[in-house]
Every structure is written in structure tokens, then in C-alpha cells.
Amino acid sequence: MVKFSDRIDVKYGTIIIGAGMSGLAAGIRLAYYDQPVVILERHTTIGGLNSLYRLRGRNYDVGLHAVTNYATKGTKVGPLSKLLRQLRISWDDFDLSPQKGSVVSFPGHDVKFTNDFAFFHSEVEREFPSQKDGFANLVNAINTFDELDLSQEPVSARTVLQRHITDPVLIDLLFCPLMFYGSATPRDMDFSQFVVMFKSIFQQGFGRPYAGVRQILKKLVRKFKEQGGELKLRHGVQQILVKDSKAYGVILDDGTQLEADHVLSSIGVAETLKLCPGYERIPEESPSFRPGDISFCETIYVIKDQPRDLGHDPTIVFYNRAPEFTYDVPTEPCDLRSGIICSPNNFNYGLDEHGNEILLEEGIMRITALANPDYWLNLDPDAYIAAKENWEQRIYNASLGYMPDFRSQILDIDMFTPKTIKRFTGHLNGCVYGSPVKHLQGKTPINNLYLCGTDQGFLGIIGSMLSGITMANNHILSAS
Amino acid sequence: MAPSDIRQVILDILSRIAPDEDLSNLDDSVSFRQQMELDSMDFLDIVMELRKQYRVQIPEEDYPNLVSMDSTVKYLTPILKDTPAK
């Protein structure tokens, strides 16, 4: 296209805001069908909430503990195979290795699970014999539920569970991993979100690429660029251009104006509306556009040994130390009653040519706890550093009942807080799972402006990519 | 294109949609859905691939013609008869 000024130089079919999993997947679909498409990312790297960085000579992942929705190669149904088909990616490209086995640990109850749902089912029956029939009925209700129906109204998952299960401890125990890995709402979930998470974690299970999140992100970027898509890092959007209730482009941080037929935003519904002149106040005024506030602190420990050599075998431990499990914004800076311990070493990465098990080069332990965004976002710089050190130790000590004491083995430590998440992703409150009210159709009050990613509402790594795909298909490709 | 060319075009599209699928044993008379578990998203992709490659517009009411290889080739033969093979 002819460049007729420094301010307006290109017109795109679609502008995608944010180069996370959902934006990249949407971009691949659009570019594949020959749409002129650009992805704008304010940060210096891709990934959004599932990103990567290098620190003191080591690669770190942020976000991804495990890819949920695991399926073995050749599986023809389910979210992973749907995703691979839509993106024209081979199963081998993601290089997923299955988990060894995880556990939900509550006072008096340890329920293990692997990628074999029958095993988890037998574990629930063993630990909660009186709930055997009720649990079977719940599983049946889950299996017959159509979570892909985008027109459904929210229903309380807790209410549905109470219909089948009478032991409140089992209800909390089932909620624990599902909430930790995807709930934007405190204390309860929408039943359709519960079903998505139940299937993705308990029925399909966990996998991880040997190289971590970069394996997936690299494939997505390569695929996007091969199809002719443009990716612009360090290109933040300061305003979405709207005229007659219709989006027609964006203004970048440096003042450059880009026009497009469609704008697809992955940055969150409140974050998106705040960029639209005349619509900035909607998130404060309307509860259905309010940003979420569930966030976490996580410490990543690099240690000398493989965790299993210290006696730690589980892939992921979801623990709760209190009589009841509380998933909510804590009143304290971090919630010490519950947490997640993830060891990326404890996946089955297969055997090398000599028949030896393939291991990660160093031991890694990641410990995650619910955090209070207000506290972490409002500390002055010195107090922030001191608070990180203090809470790192307190979360570590609270986790010691569920892992060996490896403090003497530590080679390096890094910790993120809600402040880190806000700084690098732009999500208000450092929120991880998006707005409490999801916008399943991906529509906004503005025409030609659509949502994908956490606030549209498909969850997890595979879900986020399917979100981008589905929104690109429904709003842009089927319209063209 | 002759029916045999059209069959190859469809095979190429299917192998792009499902790169891990072994298509050498595809039974032309049995539905794609049954053999490959294709869903509505995949059928939309077959339609869009045809549009992308050969500028063929397939109206939504004709989608049932794409159920199996035999029915797809039969449906596309008159539409693509003057289109050269690539």
C-alpha cells in the first residue's frame, strides 16, 4: 500500500493486540487464509501470561506449569487434536511428554492422579468410599455436558457438586486443582468452566515440552511468520480508534496510527475498553466488565539435584492445610494455607539412545501461592524487595510438609508477584485468569472489536489457543 | 480437473488439516467424520481451503455433499472441470 504520511501507512485486515498464546493462534488462522494481519505486543518478547525470560545465564518459564488437555499422538478427538488441526501443526511440534503423577493433598486425604482417569476415579473411591455413587453421578453429568456451547448462562458449580456429593471435603478437594489452574472467580466456578477444567486436568491430564513454554511459542511464531503474518514487539497500543461505535484501527504508543477492518484484543475486556475513547468508564460502572483480582506469587528454585533424588516424585502437588479450602484474594499478602508445588523434572521425557532416562539439566521447584494484588502493587521499591524475601521464606516453610527441605541445594532463586505480572502483561491487578465474568462470544459493545484469551473464557494453554482460533473463525473468517 | 485430480486435491487438504493422519487407507465411501473424527470446524476448513486454492465458493446448504471422498469428488467434478490442476 502507498505510504502517504508518517501517521497512516498501512491498512490491515486484522490487528491483534497481544502476542500471547491466543493472539498468536488467532494470527496463524488469519494469516493462513491470506488476511493481512499484524500482532502488536508492548513487551520485548512474546507469550503474555505464559512467557519466558533469561536471568543470570538460565532460561526460565513463567506461567505454564504443565500443558493441560494432554493427549497421546494419534488421538483424533479432544481439544489438543482440534488445536493441532486448526493450526496445521503436527503433534511432534509441541513435543509433549506426559506427567509422572500428581497429588491433591488435604488434611487426612491424599488423592493421586495421572493421565489415566480410571486411576483418579479409583483414588477418589478409595479415599471417599461413602461418595462412590455420588462421584460416579458427577462424572456422568460432566461427560454429558456440552461445554462448547457458547450461548449458555452461568450456573454455580458448587451447587451442582452438592447435588451429587455430600462430603464437603471431597467437593473442596475436587475444586482445588481446577481453581488453582484456571478460576477467575473466588470460592465457586461457573459449572461450564468447572467441566472444562475437570476434563482438561483429571480426564486428559498434564504434559510438558522438554524445552518448556518456549517450544510452543517458537512453533507458533514460526508458523505465523511463514504464513505472512507480521509480529511487532515493543509496539504498545495506547488507543483503539472508534467511530460510530465501530473500531477501525489503533494508535501506537509512539503516535503511529494503524487501520484495520477488525481489531482482536487479547489484553482483557476492561483493559481493552480503557483504550476506547468514550468507553473508558464502562469497566468501573458495569460489573460484567470488571477486571479480575485473582493473582499469585511464585518462587522458582533452581537446585543442584533432580527433585526425585531428594525423594520428591510428584509432578505437581496441590496442597491445602486448612479444614476448608479457600480460593479467594487473601487478606494477608499471600495465603499460606494452600499452594502448588510444581517440578518440571517430574515428567516422563523418555529414554536416550543408551536407554537412560532423559532428565532436565538442573532441578527446578516452583512454589505458587495466592496473593493479594493491592498489597503487592502498592509497596515502595525497598519494601517490595524486603516483602519478597520475607514471603518467599514463609511460603517455602508452609510447603515443607509436602516436599523435602532443599534449601541447602539452591543454586538460584527468582520470584514473581502480582506486580511482576502487571508490569509485563499489563493485566490490571496482576490478574492471572482474567475477568470473573467471561465473554464467551468474544463480543464487546463496539462493532468489529472482539476479545480472545482469558476474558473470552477458554482456559489453560490449549484453551487459550483455541480461544484465539475460535474468535478468528467466528468473527473474521466466516464473515469474509 | 478430472475426478482423480480432485481426489488428490482433497487428500492434500486433509493431510494439511490432519498431518498426523495416515490417509493411505482412506475408504472413499465412508464419511470423513467416521474415519477421521472431523468436526464442523474441520469441514469449514475444507471449504475455506478450496476457496483459498481454487476460488471455489461452496454455499452452506451444499456442505452435506462433503461427507465422504466419493460424494465430495462427485460434487466438485462439474464445478472444477474447467479449472486446471496445480
Image: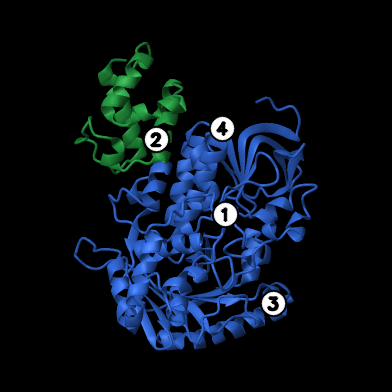
Chain colours: A blue, B green
* Element on which disc 1 rests: loop
Amino acid type at circle 4 is: Ala
Mark 1–mark 3 distance (CA, rounded to whole Å): 27 Å
Q: Which residue is mark 3?
A: A375
Same chain assignment for discs 4 and 1: yes
Q: Which residue is mark 2?
A: B43
Which subunit holds the residue at mark 4? A
- Mark toward the viewer: 1 or 2: 2
- The residue positioned 63% from the left and 70% from the top of the image is A418
Instruction: Give the image location of residue A148, x and y in percent.
Output: 46, 51
Q: Residues within 10 Å of mark 3 (few under 14, many from 20)?
A: some
Q: Residues within 10 Å of mark 1 (few under 14, many from 20)?
A: some
Same chain assignment for discs 1 and 2: no
Q: Residues within 10 Å of mark 4 (few under 14, many from 20)?
A: few
Q: Are marks 1 and 2 in contact (CB under 8 Å)?
A: no
- The residue positioned 57% from the left and 76% from the top of the image is A370
Closer to the N terminus: mark 1 or mark 3? 1
Instruction: Give the image location of residue B39, x and y in percent.
Output: 37, 41
Mark 3–mark 2 distance (CA, rounded to whole Å): 50 Å
- Mark toward the viewer: 1 or 3: 3
Amino acid type at circle 1 is: Thr
Q: Residues within 10 Å of mark 2 (few under 14, many from 20)?
A: some
Same chain assignment for discs 3 and 2: no
Q: Which residue is mark 1?
A: A45
Amino acid type at circle 3 is: Tyr
Amino acid type at circle 2 is: Phe
Q: Closest to the observer: A173 or B82?
A: A173
